[in-house]
Image (cartoon, rainbow, N blue to C red):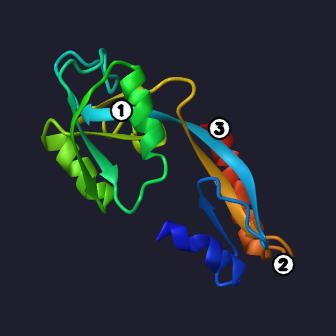
Amino acid sequence: MSFQFPAMVKSQEIDFALGVELQPDRGIRTTPMASIPDCLMGRKSEEDRDCIMVQWPVDPLKIIWPSGGFSRRDALRANLCSLGLAIAQDRELDSAFVALDLVSRSEWMMTCPVILLDPQLDAENFAMRPLGPNMNFDISLIEEKVTPMTQAAMAFVAILRDHLEIT
């Protein structure tokens, strides 16, 4: 679905969208909004403190990826390998909620932006470990180049920018 957002913005079906950095496209402007660290997330073990994974997993990983040609998979896979983590199996799932449920109940793990994990609500079920300073999920504002956003859209983007600066 998110791959359709630029076309929807370009046709003015929607005022703007948020997404990952895009290839240059006439009629579309992207502006960086936030760079959020990626993490490896799994079911919490007895060794983990709060929601922090104390050590990297020893056994080869079983990883769940978003489906649909996930554009960041190769970079994330390379990063996991550079950390000495082998991947035994991987699967694609369409729903982040289904992936989270599977991770909370099994040995399967996933990579995701740390913002996906709420340290207060998720601490009893999940543990995460950041993948390092060079692995970030970059969110961009996608807007039509010529036509300005509506007042309501500009106000929403301003609130979102403020929130992203705080977190």
> Mark 3 or mark 1: which comes first in sequence?
1
CB within 8 Å, label 3 to label 1: no
Residue 79's image quarter?
top left
Q: SS class of the residue under badge 2?
A: loop
Visible residue check, residue 50 = yes
Instruction: Give the answer, above or below, for where 160 lies relative to 165.
Output: below
Visible residue check, residue 113 = no
Q: Residue at x 29, y 56 (%)?
A: 97
Q: Which mark is residue 166?
A: 3
Q: Would you call the spot at circle 2 few (<14 residues within 10 Å), some (14-19), or many (20 or more)?
A: few
Cα–Cα gap, marks 3 and 1: 23 Å
Residue underneath mark 1: 40
Residue 101 spot, x, y in % from top left:
21, 50
Instruction: Give the answer, above or below, for where 125 lies relative to 16.
Output: above
* Residue nearest the observer in this picture, 163 or 73: 73
Residue 35 spot, x, y in % from top left:
62, 39
Left or right placement of residue 135 versus residue 22 in this view: left
Which numbered disc, 3 or 2, marks the residue closer to the eye?
2
Left or right placement of residue 143 versus residue 146 in this view: left
- Check disc 3 and give the amino acid type: Ile
* Residue nearest the observer in this picture, 84 or 105: 84
Q: Which mark is residue 147?
A: 2
Residue 166's image quarter?
top right
Which numbered disc, 3 or 1, marks the residue closer to the eye?
1
> Mark 2 or mark 1: which comes first in sequence?
1
Q: SS class of the residue under badge 3?
A: helix
Q: SS class of the residue under badge 1?
A: strand
> Mark 3 or mark 2: which comes first in sequence?
2
Residue 167 spot, x, y in % from top left:
59, 37
- Check disc 2 and give the amino acid type: Thr
Left or right placement of residue 153 versus residue 39 in this view: right
CB within 8 Å, label 2 to label 1: no
